[in-house]
Image: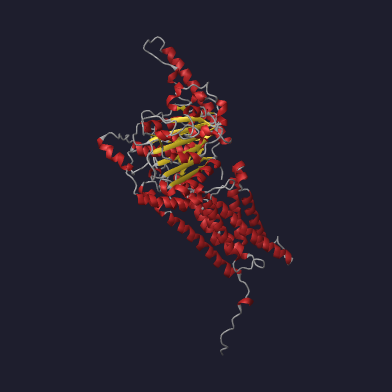
């Protein structure tokens, strides 16, 4: 007997089945964020293609390698040699105006995303990504749901965010690989932090509303497995979030790391006891983490190294037998086996280029040109212990060498042809063993595609800018521009607190500057700004350099303005010198409105590295330096020593150091690109923040 079709229940009278509807919203959320990620990768595809062509993409994927066959020992290209002249000059060909115009327009569009507000740690582009992600999460939680009566939707969406949290947390992420060099885990970690907070938001909404319903209907909360495990999972997640705020990470990093790792293990266990619907969303995070661990195992190297305490604030680490498979600006996580501190790993930037590119292999260099050079500034317990160990052990080695030399002198005292002195004592470098994990990160800009480059760093942030400087100078002056590098002028700015800090990296900067001095189609000027008068006599003679004393860090906007402003004619400048009609830079301090003699009184002293022996330190009225910012701004126009190459070739800016410096550089580039991006042929920016984010 047939009774016909069963009547359908009106939608208004249907019971909300969260176990059927809410998983559909998990799928929708995954599709949305996956589509956004795919669009971002598609947008970055041209950059990835360029990096593949110039050989930088996927470099370091399997860790740092040693050049067993000696292929990295290339000879320096001589531009006057007819055999190499055409090869060395080919990179100086002008870029088509159409391409530069397009790059300028893209630069203007991107400039909006570079604006950064103090205190946030995020630029406008990153804020947009975070807000878009939060809006997507809230829409998926709220739309067509009944949260007050049934808050399962928020719990389901919290689980759906686990893959996002882990995808952007691992150091070896497929996203970093596909975005190209310069987009390592440290650049994408902000998505990990904010997606974790959104996950916690969903968990709080889910848990708090269920607790409210249990209290309203007088249902026991603690006792049953589902409720007890749910409260435990929420508590563990809350502990992870509270210990992840920046003050905790900055002051108690080891505590934060232990809680973070163990907390997520506990969260996974409790959430699986809480609901069977968590299991499918646990596997992707575990897969991401397992892949990261596997890649880190492939990248780990144990090498011999030497420690050298330059002073009480800086320790240089020279690692042997590391030749290739990294790019300039990348960093490694270093573990030094000394004094029982073998369990601590710290990120340090490589401040030299690979052996086939570096400028440190020349005859005037004190470095070997092979291996990796790292700089560890004393900022915490580990770096202080490392510096003390290098200092104490180095002095012990030096004392042994002195005794050895003294004994040799006694033996050779009767030999009139023997000549031993203390000069034969080697530097007190301490041999150690280290473990490397990396490389990671790198510079997101191909500096060879820009005619003008500004490298600005604060303190130990110079390890990054020196590394990319070594790379671009090596490519242009040593290898003869193999990838049609267009770089013509480089301004290297370094901000320090004392003159003694200049000696930290002198052995690396000097060979680079010496090589540029012999290259006719590349200019380099080094500007070192010191904010504390300590020992000006210790300034090393770096070619084409100026050491200036300022009360505060120079304004990046003014330096950029100077680099992109055409030089004045002699007739237009009161303090110009040279033949009639010669292009010069006006550096008189107050413009060209007054006499040169009057303006000279307002100028701060410039300690030129090329004439350091002729300096007259005492007569300088140093007490007025900090009170005359106009004079200091005039001296910041150091590009008077750089040959003008015109506009339209592109400007690249790399800033490395504290957050205040990178924020200022980011805003300066945003302003310049927004107003003159098309005229300049595009303005590129890469920043490295040397602090916990």
Quadrant (top left, top right, bottom left, bottom right) of the N terminus: bottom right
Tell which of 613 and 295 is nearer to you: 613
* Residue 671: image location, x then y, percent: 50, 47
Q: Position of residue 406 (x, y in %)?
A: 46, 15
Depth check: 306 or 573 in front? 573
Task: Check the picture and name the quadrant holding the C terminus.
Answer: top right
Q: As displayed, is residue 216 above or below residue 525?
A: below
Say if residue 347 shows up in the picture: no
Left or right of 134 in this view: 428: left
Q: Is residue 640 visible?
A: yes
As drawn, the residue found furthest toward the left would be 82
Q: Nearer the viewer, residue 213 or 567?
A: 567
Question: Looking at the rendering, which quadrant does residue 369 occupy?
Answer: top left
Q: Outermost residue, right direction?
A: 218
Colour setting: secondary structure
Quadrant of the image occupied by residue 442:
top left
Identify whether 341 is placed above or below 49: above
State whether residue 240 is above or below residue 141.
Answer: above
Q: Position of residue 342 (x, y in %)?
A: 54, 38
* 4 to the left or right of 489: right
Residue at the spot 55% in from the left edge and 42% down from the top edge: 659
State the residue in front, 319 or 573.
573
Total marks shown come to: 0
| Residue 559, position as x, y percentages in the image | 48, 38
């Amino acid at each position: 007997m047939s009774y016909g079709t069963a009547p359908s229940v009106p939608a208004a009278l249907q019971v909300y089945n969260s176990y059927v509807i809410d998983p559909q919203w998990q799928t929708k959320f995954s599709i949305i964020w996956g589509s956004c990620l795919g669009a971002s990768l598609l947008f970055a595809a041209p950059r990835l293609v360029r990096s593949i062509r110039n050989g930088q993409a996927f470099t370091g994927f399997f860790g740092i390698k040693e050049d067993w066959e000696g292929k990295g020992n290339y000879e320096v290209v001589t531009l006057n040699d007819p055999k190499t002249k055409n090869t060395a000059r080919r990179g100086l060909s002008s870029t088509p105006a159409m391409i530069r115009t397009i790059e300028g327009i893209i630069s203007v569009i991107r400039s909006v995303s570079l604006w950064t507000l103090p205190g946030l740690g995020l630029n406008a582009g990153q804020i947009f990504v975070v807000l878009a992600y939060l809006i997507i999460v809230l829409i998926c939680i709220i739309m067509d749901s009944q949260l007050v009566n049934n808050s399962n939707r928020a719990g389901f969406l919290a689980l759906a965010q686990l893959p996002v949290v882990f995808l952007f947390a691992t150091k070896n992420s497929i996203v970093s690989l596909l975005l190209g060099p310069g987009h390592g885990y440290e650049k994408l970690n902000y998505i990990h932090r904010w997606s974790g907070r959104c996950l916690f938001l969903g968990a709080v909404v889910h848990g708090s509303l269920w607790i409210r319903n249990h209290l309203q209907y007088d249902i026991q909360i603690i006792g049953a497995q589902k409720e007890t495990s749910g409260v435990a999972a929420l508590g563990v997640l809350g502990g992870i979030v509270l210990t992840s705020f920046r003050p905790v990470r900055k002051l108690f990093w080891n505590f934060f790391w232990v809680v973070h790792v163990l907390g997520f293990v506990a969260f996974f266990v409790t959430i699986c006891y809480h609901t069977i619907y968590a299991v499918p969303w646990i596997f992707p995070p575990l897969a991401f983490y397992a892949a990261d661990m596997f890649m880190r195992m492939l990248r780990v190297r144990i090498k011999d190294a030497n420690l050298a305490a330059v002073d009480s604030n800086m320790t240089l680490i020279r690692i042997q037998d590391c030749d290739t498979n990294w790019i300039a600006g990348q960093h490694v996580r270093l573990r030094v086996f000394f004094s029982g501190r073998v369990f601590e790993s710290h990120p340090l930037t490589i401040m030299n280029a690979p052996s086939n590119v570096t400028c440190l292999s020349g005859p005037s260099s004190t470095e070997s040109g092979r291996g990796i050079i790292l700089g560890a500034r004393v900022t915490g317990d580990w770096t202080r212990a490392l510096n003390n160990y290098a200092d104490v052990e180095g002095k012990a080695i030096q004392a042994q060498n002195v005794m050895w030399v003294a004994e040799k002198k006694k033996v050779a005292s009767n030999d009139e042809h023997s000549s031993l002195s203390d000069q034969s004592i080697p530097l007190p470098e301490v041999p150690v063993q280290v473990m490397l994990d990396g490389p990671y990160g790198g510079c997101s800009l191909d500096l060879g595609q820009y005619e003008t480059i500004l490298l600005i760093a604060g303190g130990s942030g110079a390890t990054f800018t020196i590394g990319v400087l070594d790379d671009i100078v090596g490519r242009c002056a040593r290898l003869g521009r193999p990838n049609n590098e267009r770089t013509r002028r480089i301004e290297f700015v370094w901000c320090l607190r004392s003159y003694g800090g200049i000696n930290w990296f002198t052995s690396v900067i000097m060979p680079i500057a010496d090589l540029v001095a012999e290259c006719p189609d590349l200019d380099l000027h080094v500007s070192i700004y010191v904010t504390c008068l300590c020992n000006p006599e210790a300034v090393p003679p770096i070619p084409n350099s100026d050491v200036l004393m300022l009360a505060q860090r120079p304004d990046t906007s003014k330096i950029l303005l100077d680099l992109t402003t055409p030089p004045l004619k002699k007739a237009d400048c009161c303090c110009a010198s040279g033949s009639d009609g010669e292009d010069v830079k006006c550096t008189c301090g107050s413009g060209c409105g007054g006499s040169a003699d009057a303006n000279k009184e307002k100028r701060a002293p410039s300690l030129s590295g090329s004439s350091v022996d002729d300096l007259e330190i005492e007569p300088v009225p140093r007490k007025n330096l900090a009170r005359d910012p106009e004079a200091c701004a005039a001296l910041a126009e150091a590009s008077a020593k750089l040959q003008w190459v015109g506009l339209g070739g592109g400007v690249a800016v790399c800033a490395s150091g504290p957050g205040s410096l990178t924020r200022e550089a980011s805003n300066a580039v945003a302003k310049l690109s927004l107003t003159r991006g098309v005229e300049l042929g595009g303005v590129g920016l890469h920043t490295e923040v040397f602090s916990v984010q």
